[in-house]
Amino acid sequence: MKTPLPTDIYVGSRIRLQRTFLRITQTALGERLGITFQQIQKYENGKNRVSPSKIYQISEIFQVPISFFFPDGGTTEPVSQSVERFDELSLFLQTVEGRELNHAFRRIRGPKVRRAVVALAKSMAGENNDP
């Protein structure tokens, strides 16, 4: 069995992130793409590479630019570092609480209230709020 490449893992993580953010099941996404949910799982785990045409279709379904699925274009950071940095966010959004917190936080309109929520979360986590 081949080891997935960092780029394939990153692309799969971005698919999973946006799919869960939009509350689309693997089955529903697979149906829209004409493939099985197992294939979606393989894409998301980086076990199978996503073809350019599938990336295009997925970007249309998710209504994001194709560049969404790749590390920042202008950086010199290796893809492997982008994957490591991204894993924490991806894992957070895979939890029910993470998704609920994200959806609630996005509905808060005032920047002062958002900062207060962040300060409260940091305080509850025992983090120092100093800049």
Image (tube, rainbow, N blue to C red):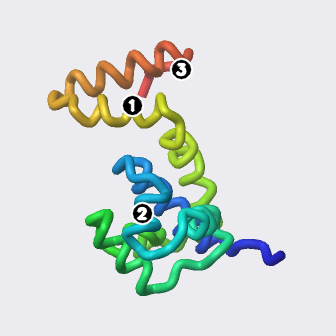
In primary-sequence order, the first of circles 1 and 3 is 1
**In x, y percent, where is residue 63?**
26, 65
Would you call the spot at circle 2 few (<14 residues within 10 Å), some (14-19), or many (20 or more)? some
Residue under the point 46% across and 67% down: 30
In primary-sequence order, the first of circles 1 and 2 is 2
Q: Amino acid at mark 3?
A: Glu
In the image, farthest residue toward the right: 1
In primary-sequence order, the first of circles 3 and 2 is 2
**In x, y percent, where is residue 103?**
32, 35
| Position above or below: 47 against 95 | below
Q: Quadrant of residue 78?
A: bottom right
Q: Which residue is mark 2?
A: 29
Closer to the camera, 33 or 73? Answer: 33
- Closer to the eye: label 1 or 3: 1
* Element type at mark 2: helix
- Closer to the eye: label 3 or 2: 2
Q: Quadrant of residue 39?
A: bottom right
Q: Quadrant of the C terminus?
A: top left
Residue 100's tag is 1
Q: Quadrant of residue 125?
A: top right
Closer to the camera, 107 or 1? Answer: 1
Residue 78 seen in this snapshot: no
Q: Which residue is mark 3?
A: 127
Q: Quadrant of the N terminus?
A: bottom right
* Element type at mark 1: helix
Pointer 3 and pointer 2: residues touching (CB < 8 Å)?
no
| Position above or below: 52 against 84 | below
How far, Cα to Cα, is label 1 from label 3?
A: 22 Å
Residue under the point 60% across and 65% down: 38
Residue under the point 20% across and 24% down: 112
